Amino acid sequence: MSSPEQHPEPVRLRDLLRSWTAAIRTPATPCPETPARSPLSIWDPIHLGIDEHGRPVRVTLAYRNALLAGEPGAGKSVGLNLPTAHAALSPDCGLWLFDGKRVELGLWRDAADRFVGPDLTDATETLRDLQAEMDRRYDWLDAERRRKITPADAAHGIDPIAAIFDEVAYYSATVGTKQERETFSVLLRDLVARGRAAGVIVIAATQRPSSDIIPTSLRDLFGYRWAFRCTTDASSDIVLGHGWAARGHSAAVIAPEDKGIGLLLAEGGEPQRIKSAFLSDEQVYALADTAAWLREGRRLADDTLTAAQGGRL
Ligand SMILES: Nc1ncnc2c1ncn2[C@@H]1O[C@H](COP(=O)(O)OP(=O)(O)OP(=O)(O)O)[C@@H](O)[C@H]1O
């Protein structure tokens, strides 16, 4: 009797499943009751808002991380909803949500692959899982003699993962013991530092732009920094980088009533004053329902691929 390696049948079946998986991961038919007409891709630019000339501002998050910070009520959660919505509506992106506030990212819970509420132990364990996934991907890239994942890796079930945190300071500076907070912060830093080539995109928001929450060494790992209104030039610099306030780019000059206005620094550029797009709660619910529907197909496809790779099909 021939060994599985010599028998052509399992290989053909796996190829068939791969192409079926690739097809189902980007469904062609939109959900009929919801507003989105077609799925997005995490590899595409993400719409954040408009600049001072009314031009659209879009950024590509693949291979990048993003930090959003500003005083309470300045518009971070509204801003954070934009990459969250884009990632959730992209069937080619994993969605891991950490909601220290419980209410903000919770609207996307049904679309998330992993959802963590205000629970430091759960957040730390989930970060460990993400770190293990990142390391598995690096082992795989190493074996393939490659440096980073690409859109074509979707055929192997490897997609970017957006790990999104709303009030990151809840986990890193508020609850638990000093040791537990430190463990969380070390894991987070590792993901921000090493995750990009493995497709892990970290997007973190905080209402505490202070040096204990955002140390320079961590801040500098974020390719995109979005400072909403801050109380002082110093806290604006903590978000954007030292010296920007002295060069005329301070989020402290944004008027308190200018909700949603912020300074966006994209790698290599100058901070740009932008106004975030606004999604009402009703729009977020409608988009979240669409995303949950789209991603159900993705989960089915992933389960099937895992079963096939494990030789169970
Ligand atoms: N782009 C925008 N256009 C219009 N209104 C906005 C915009 N962004 C924010 N707002 C208004 O500002 C309010 C506060 O925004 P948001 O909840 O995002 O602030 P926040 O910085 O996350 O606050 P906190 O840190 O307290 O959670 C929103 O409820 C909304 O009314």
Image (cartoon, rainbow, N blue to C red):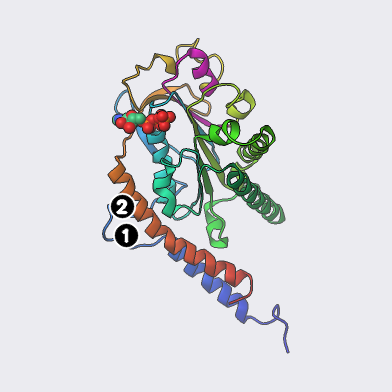
Relative image position of residue 298 (x, y in whole percent): 46, 61
Label 2 Cα neighbours within 10 Å, binned few <14 / some 14-19 / many ≥20: some
Sequence order check, earlier mark of 1 and 2: 1
The amino acid type of the residue labelled 1 equals Pro
At a point 52% along the width and 29% down the height, the residue shown is 267
Q: In this rendering, is residue 41 above or below 29? A: above
Confirm or deny contact between disc 1 and disc 2 (CB under 8 A): yes
Q: Which residue is mark 2?
A: 36
The percent coordinates of residue 120 (x first, y second) are: 59, 42
Image position of 33 (left or right of 248): left
- Return the residue at label 1: 30
Please tell me which residue lies in front, 302 or 17.
302
Count of number-bearing discs = 2
Asked if the magenta segment contains residue 160, the reply would be no
Image: 164 above or below 178: below
Where is ligand 1, by quadrant? top left
Residue range (magenta): 222-239
Going by the numbered disc 2, the residue's amino acid type is: Ala
Vertical order, 260 against 138 (above or below): above
Q: Is residue 56 visible?
A: no
Where residue 47 sits, quadrant-wise, is top left
Residue at point 27%, 61% (across, down): 32
Question: For residue 295, which quarter of the picture?
Answer: bottom left
Quarter of the image for the N terminus: give it. Answer: bottom right
Q: Depth check: 295 or 43 in front?
A: 295
Query: x%, y% of residue 103?
Result: 41, 41
